[in-house]
Image (cartoon, grey):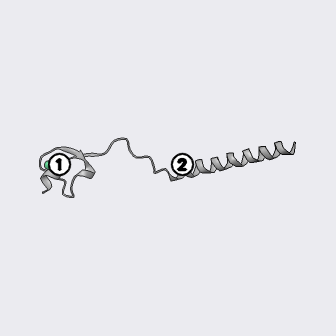
Amino acid sequence: MILRLFLLAALAWIAWRLFQQFQRGQLQRPPQQEQFEPMAPCQKCGTYLPAKALSRDGRCGRCGE
Ligand SMILES: [Zn+2]
């Protein structure tokens, strides 16, 4: 009887630990990003690229040089 109680407590502890890990994992997950990257045209050749790929003056890698 006492053994069963101990087993139950151990199970509850494991479940609690898993729950804590699960919560921490959710907190550590980076915020949901947008499904698509914002696209922007190159100022010179007009090719659409991810906005991040354009240089500061709005040109693609080929035209930026
Ligand atoms: Zn370009």
The secondary element bearing badge 2 is classed as helix
Which numbered disc covers residue 50? none
Q: Quadrant of residue 48?
A: top left
Q: Residue at x 77, y 47 (%)?
A: 9
Q: Residue at x 57, y 52 (%)?
A: 24
Q: Residue furthest right?
A: 1
- Image location (x, y in percent) of residue 4: 82, 42
- Image location (x, y in percent) of residue 43: 15, 50
Q: Residues within 10 Å of mark 1 (few under 14, many from 20)?
A: many
Residue marked by disc 2: 26
- Image location (x, y in percent) of residue 16: 68, 48
Tell whether 57 sits left or right of 12: left
Q: Nearer the viewer, residue 30 or 51?
A: 30
Mark 2–mark 1 distance (CA, rounded to whole Å) = 38 Å
User: Which tag, 2 or 1, sits closer to the chain's start?
Assistant: 2
Q: Residues within 10 Å of mark 2 (few under 14, many from 20)?
A: few
Q: Amino acid at mark 2?
A: Gln
Q: Amino acid at mark 1?
A: Cys
Tell whether 5 sits left or right of 51: right
Query: Residues at badges 2 and 1 in contact (C-beta under 8 Å)?
Result: no
Look at the numbered disc 2 and say if its residue's Cβ is closer than 8 Å to ligand 1.
no
Which numbered disc covers residue 42? 1
Look at the numbered disc 1 and say if its residue's Cβ is closer than 8 Å to ligand 1.
yes
Total marks in image: 2
Assign the C terminus to one quadrant of the image: bottom left
The secondary element bearing badge 1 is classed as loop
